[in-house]
Amino acid sequence: MRTQPCLRHTPGFGIVPAVFVLAALLVGTGLRAQQVPQGATAPGGFVIEGLAPEPVAEPIDLEAIPRFEEAPALPPPAPIRAMPIDDAGAVEIPEELLGDEEALPRSESEPMATGADVEEEVDEKDSTVKEVEKTTAPNQAPVMAEDLRAQSPPEKPDPVGSSVLTRTEARTFTFSIPAPRGQILDRNGYPLAQSKVAYYAAISFPYLGSEVSDPEVQRYAGERIVHVNNILGTDWDLSRKVVVEHYRDRRWIPLTFSSVLSSSQVDELKRQKMEGLTLQPVYLRHYPQGKTLSHVIGYVGKRPPRLKGPIVNDEALWGLPIGVDGLEQSFETDLRGTPGRVNVVFEADGTKVKEKVLSKPRPGYNVVTTIDLEMQQICERLLEEKVKRGAMVIMDVRNGDIMAMASNPQFDPNDFIPAITQDKYSALAEDPSKPLFPRAFRAAYPPASTFKAVVALGFLESGYISPNDLFPCPSSWKVGDVIMRNWNKKGEGSMNVVGALTRSCNTWFYEVASRAGADTMSYMATRLGLGQKTGIPLKETEGFIPSNRYWLDKHGYMMSDGEEAVMSIGQGTVEVTPLQSARMMAAIGNGQQVLKPRLVLQIQDLNHELERTFPVEVSNSLNVDSYSLRAVQRGLYDVVNAGNGTGKAAYHKITVSGKTGTGQWKPSQKQNISWFAGYFPSKNPVYSFAVIYEGDPGEVVSGGKQTAPVVGAFLEEYLNEENYNRVRSRANMLEEEAPLDEAEEYTSRAPVQSIFQEGEPEPVLTEVVPEQTEAAARPRPDSGGFFQRIFKRRRQ
């Protein structure tokens, strides 16, 4: 009697096929677990250093693996090194990694709009029972774990040869060795998505003899399933059909029967070993930051079905999931890597006699994003605390890098690994707050008064107004039989464009829009990138900017004065995304270019060699008159910093410029939105931002009340000494609280006239508070005003 050389015994525990040990060595040798610095929670990546001289069946002692104490990141375009990680996340893949991820229960129905795997809320054994009942006689019931306790083990087999590959001559098969999936990193190397080791309980069949019966094969499997269930208190099982077919056709590959085991379950099975029972390690996707950036990263799913039938050439040793949303989907080809190939020769009886590695698997590339994890986490925390539903985007005005892009509420992509339960999926899909929906780039909203910055620049550039021209800001404006009122229902005298932006006077914009026309506004909006996809590597919505041509094609007439008036305050059919709004403010802030937002810096291998980079791209030059630009910039500055501005809640030690907005979103439900968009510092801006807040039905909202404080809180938390000095250095600021130059340098060639001419302005706290007494609303000289108090900035 001879023992098949293709089986290697793990002492006292199980049998691991040598061909899979070899595959594991190709993938796992040299993989390192790294330590995470305090405050970061993420496992590290894989580095293939070579093939071990001899395969072993014993798992690697993870505690003995050398770990990196620190891995500093280099600024782009230099390679980014993944930051160290700890044992809470990914660990080195053991050498006996076999993988059979597709054995997990899954739903065949199409999950979500993005195609995630959804685990049906039915016991796995029920579905397998139904499958077998359709194909077997009534007395051939599925093998249930509890049915096997009283059955005796099979007699000792006579190893004459395998019944699966019995041939008159030797056969050679080529197996595909899956490659580890690459990581997704933030700009400083902190991991956002990577792989970790997981284990399944599996049966490793020995050769049971040439005449072994189906019941004997089933008893062998059942005893091991019962053993595991008794130890762990589980009820896993397999059908007769699956057990017998696997043994007859694929017995060299361990047959998994559990779901992912917890670490305590793994330890318990290691203590209570049984021959023919093995722990099958695989690597699963892991999102170490949890919900953070979930709408951008996406997730993986859609595992291939369980392989059946005899082993065929080029068959993968185990299945891997694919990206179905976010960056996981967009960079699937880069992240997936290149599988290796190995030839295995079997004798006529199925005994493996020779193997040759044709090529090693090449791990997937790492995708380095532009995201700053610190910024992202602050944004998400503030949205969760202050914004029930909404989004926040921060963008570098110099190069278009997206530093943070948050939507609230979120979801945890780890729920989709290895498969989301039906209950969890239904809860997410049916949640009225839509946690699966990326509001930052896939939701379009009326821009409300933030659009006035675009409109004002269009008015100035078209020549219909100059920075010094005064127009009235009455309490109402009449077009036909319709009376359109100012937001505070008060008249505020005459003002120039700076004053109109500062006070956000609706009636001023109604009047000028009726003179300048719709195309003046739509042209500038289009130049600033509104109403069109930004070009990020994610599915995004376009939004919409109306024009006379569109109106004529759709309605048969040009836009009326009333429709132009509504458009001028960012209402009606005007729709933009928060990302587009941040991009627009970046263009106004840098004053030169409309940049394509950049979400990914570079693709690099695990040795930190660059595969390709993504350079800064300019969509178009702004090419506006400097005096027009300065007038708009001054207006945005005064919104935040003047005593009567509507966005004073964003006042901070670094000067902020921006525009608030409050708009009707779902009028039938009396549901409104509020905006705050702008940039900082006001001089030589470094970052632009956009925040949106979705109000509840009937809720009174305003940019000054809900969204400007979010930006102020962000600056308060983010601008510690190190970050403040970094921003200040980039902006070339000479003083910590340097004010802007005099008004004439921002508005016109000649000294600008007084912003307000006829009548005393009504100081207000927010854009939607219609009544405020002068005593209550006028800022105290020692306090700096309501929003200044929030942001703790004082003039010296």
Image (cartoon, helix red, strand yellow):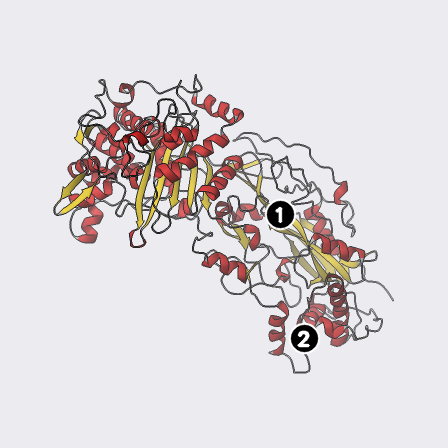
Where does the image place residue 348, in percent across and percent down from the top left? Answer: 76, 66
Kind of residue sitting beneath label 1: Ser
- Neighbor class of circle 1 (other Cα within 10 Å; few <14, some 14-19, many 20+) is many
| Residue at image mark 1 | 195
Where does the image place residue 100, in percent across and percent down from the top left? Answer: 66, 58
- Neighbor class of circle 2 (other Cα within 10 Å; few <14, some 14-19, many 20+) is many
Are circles 1 and 2 on residues that touch, CB within 8 Å?
A: no
Where does the image place residue 415, in percent across and percent down from the top left? Answer: 56, 54
Task: State the separation of the CA atoms marked 1 and 2.
Answer: 35 Å
**Residue 142 disc label:** 2
Which one is nearer the viewer's eye here, 313 or 62? 62
Kind of residue sitting beneath label 2: Pro
**Residue 83 disc label:** none
Which one is nearer the viewer's eye here, 446 or 329? 446
Could you tell me if residue 245 is visible in this image? yes
Pick whichever of labels 1 and 2 is earlier in the sequence.
2
